């Protein structure tokens, strides 16, 4: 055989395949997607903790409405609804002492001033003021349920302040 045509004498190498693609480091797009998902997660965690007073107030008001439906004293439920609303309002304000001292018409005007429109309108405001002092007979239970529903709507409409 001719030494020039002998393949073992030519110094050629066999075909080599490239190495497998590594999963690390990630491409830039994956890093950006990870940062975006992490940022969205942080946003929702912060939002969850900032609105915990809203959820607690709504939960308490719904428990009061359920208690009225179960036969509890509607006058007591109306008083507790007003107390829950006042405690919630105190968590929203920087100076909670200004909310703590409000009673009667000043309390209702505060509630109306912090709502879209006139949530505590003529009927609802009178219910909030008069149901605790009514006799148990009559429509006190329905009025207490209405008060609880209006209070839940007011709480849900409140943005974070302070």
Image (tube, rainbow, N blue to C red):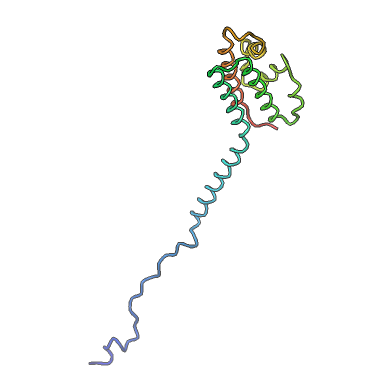
Residue lying at 71% horizontally and 29% vertically, measured from the top left = 93
Q: Residue 31: give x, y in percent of width and height.
A: 52, 54
Q: Please give the name of the residue rendered at 58% of the width and 7% of the height, measured from the top-left corner.
A: 137
Q: In which quarter of the image is the N terminus?
A: bottom left
Q: Position of residue 4 (x, y in %)?
A: 28, 90
Residue 51 in the image, given as x and y percentages of width and height: 61, 34
Q: Quadrant of the C terminus?
A: top right
| Quarter of the image where one finds residue 62 | top right
Is residue 109 found left or right of 47 in the rendered image? right
Res. 142 image quadrant:
top right
Query: Is 88 rendered above or below residue 72?
Result: below
Residue found farthest to the left: 1
Looking at the rendered structure, the number of numbered marks drawn on it comes to 0
Q: Where is residue 103 in the image (x, y as percent from the top left)?
A: 73, 17
61 over 139 or under it: above or below = below
Please determine whether, in this image, residue 75 is positioned above or below residue 14: above
Task: Answer above or below: position of 40 versus 131.
Answer: below
Residue found 77% across the figure and 27% down from its top: 97
Residue farthest toward the top in the current orientation of the protein: 138
């Amino acid at each position: 055989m001719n030494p020039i045509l002998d393949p073992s004498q030519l110094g050629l190498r066999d075909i080599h395949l490239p190495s497998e693609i590594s999963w690390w480091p990630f491409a830039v797009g994956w890093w950006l997607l990870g940062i975006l998902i992490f940022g969205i997660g942080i946003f929702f965690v912060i939002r969850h903790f900032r609105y915990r007073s809203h959820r607690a107030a709504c939960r308490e008001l719904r428990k009061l409405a359920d208690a009225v439906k179960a036969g509890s004293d509607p006058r007591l439920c109306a008083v507790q609804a007003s107390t829950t609303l006042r405690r919630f309002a105190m968590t929203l304000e920087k100076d909670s002492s200004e909310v703590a001292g409000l009673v009667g018409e000043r309390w209702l005007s505060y509630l109306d001033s912090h709502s879209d429109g006139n949530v505590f309108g003529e009927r609802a405001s009178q219910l909030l003021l008069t149901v605790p002092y009514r006799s148990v007979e009559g429509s006190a239970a329905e009025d207490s349920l209405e008060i609880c529903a209006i209070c839940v709507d007011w709480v849900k409409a409140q943005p974070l302040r302070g």
